Image (spheres, grey):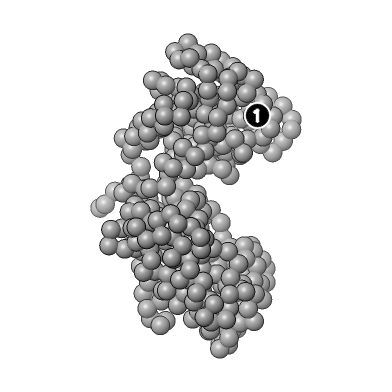
Amino acid sequence: MMSAPKIPHQEFQQRINSLTEQMDSQGMDALLVYGDEYRKENLRYVSNYWPIFERGALVLGKGQKPMVLCAPEGEQVAKEMSIWPDVRLIPDFVCVTVPDKIDYPHANYSSFSEIASELRSKVSLKTLGVAGLGDMSEAMLENVRNSFSCHIADANPILFKLRKEKSENEIACLREAARLAEAGFRAMMESELIGKTERYAAAIAEGVARKEGAECITFTVFGSGERSARIIGRAENKIIEDGDMIMCALAIQYEGYVSTYEIPFAVGNYSAKTKRVIDVLINASEAGLPHLKPGEPMKHFVRAVRDHFRKEGLAEYDVYPPLHGIGCAEAESPYPDENTDAVFESGMTVNTDISLFGLEGGSNRVEEGFVIRGNGAETLCPFMRNYFENWK
């Protein structure tokens, strides 16, 4: 039996080594990588820790081992998940949803000031790089500034750069996330949905994905019939009717990596106008596919998709760019438009997001994950490829 894919300890150490090199080149003496339940990507990438309704961080000083900061209720989770054994409790990181000071009588707290002093005992602390400046509360950032008493530099670009090109282990995790999403989506798609609520349909997909091994249902976007025009609507108690377009995007997280899956489809006796929307979306996806290869300017993919919409007279229903990167976030760099000169590179992972919203026949999109390889794009979604071929 094959072992389940995951990111090994050695790869986390390689990430820390790369961070240290970037810190040197940017003149940073230490680095603080912030994360919480909702903006988890950078923290998960460098430590594997993902807080639950609390906040967290990784602190790295030059020549020092990483330390993971968390809050009392999440201490055992942090110790269980974190690659790094040095776990500290910080009072600033307690429950994000209440203003009250919560009493944790058994918490053995440290503080930003103590950590800054510890760093200063080993390195001259003139500049602290912070990844997540825009994600922290103003009060927390002010405490970081006061406690570290040094220049604060934006370290987000460092993390975004490191995360853009994926290792084979990361690709394996994304492929598994896509497999789980595909299993859930197929189960829903192949079920009798007419007469059921949108929430019932969404539950089929989510339940199967969880049963197959999903770490988290990052989100389920759902709309049927007229509600398919809700670009990112949630499943409601609306009854699915004969002929309804089904717009469902299922985002599944596995080992910190997120793949999103969406096939445009309709149920029962749907109209010719609904069929046309699905036709155009699938054909637009096929038009862009040849441009997903190393060295190809990203704008060529975007233009190919949008040229197809223009040819079909449907450009006014195209509401945002049709491609974005994937990884520890459901959408991450690159996010190209028709003017993006940057080229695809081998090892990048991307997700199509090809959409038409507001048409009489219904609204929908195609979301399919790919790995950019030397010989072109490798799909993460084999069933979707077969479905599109059969549809055509």
Which residue matches tag 1?
Answer: 140
356 with respect to 327 (left or right): right
Residue 331 at what x, y percent from top left? 51, 53
Q: Give the answer, above or below, for where 49 lies relative to 277.
A: above
- Residue at 61%, 30% (x, y): give it: 93
Dot 1 falls on a residue whose secondary structure is: helix
Q: Nearer the viewer, residue 174 or 371?
A: 371
Q: Is residue 324 visible?
A: no
The answer to which image quadrant residue 162 occupies is top left
20 with respect to 309 (left or right): left
Q: Nearer the viewer, residue 153 or 385?
A: 153
Kind of residue at disc 1: Met
Residue 54 at what x, y percent from top left? 60, 35
Residue 125 at what x, y percent from top left? 51, 17
Q: Give the answer, above or below, for where 99 lies relative to 369.
A: above
- Residue at 53%, 76% (x, y): give it: 309
- Residue at 51%, 60% (x, y): give it: 339
Q: Residues within 10 Å of mark 1 (few under 14, many from 20)?
A: few
- Residue at 49%, 39% (x, y): give it: 157
Q: Nearer the viewer, residue 143 or 386?
A: 143
Direction top: furthest residue: 121
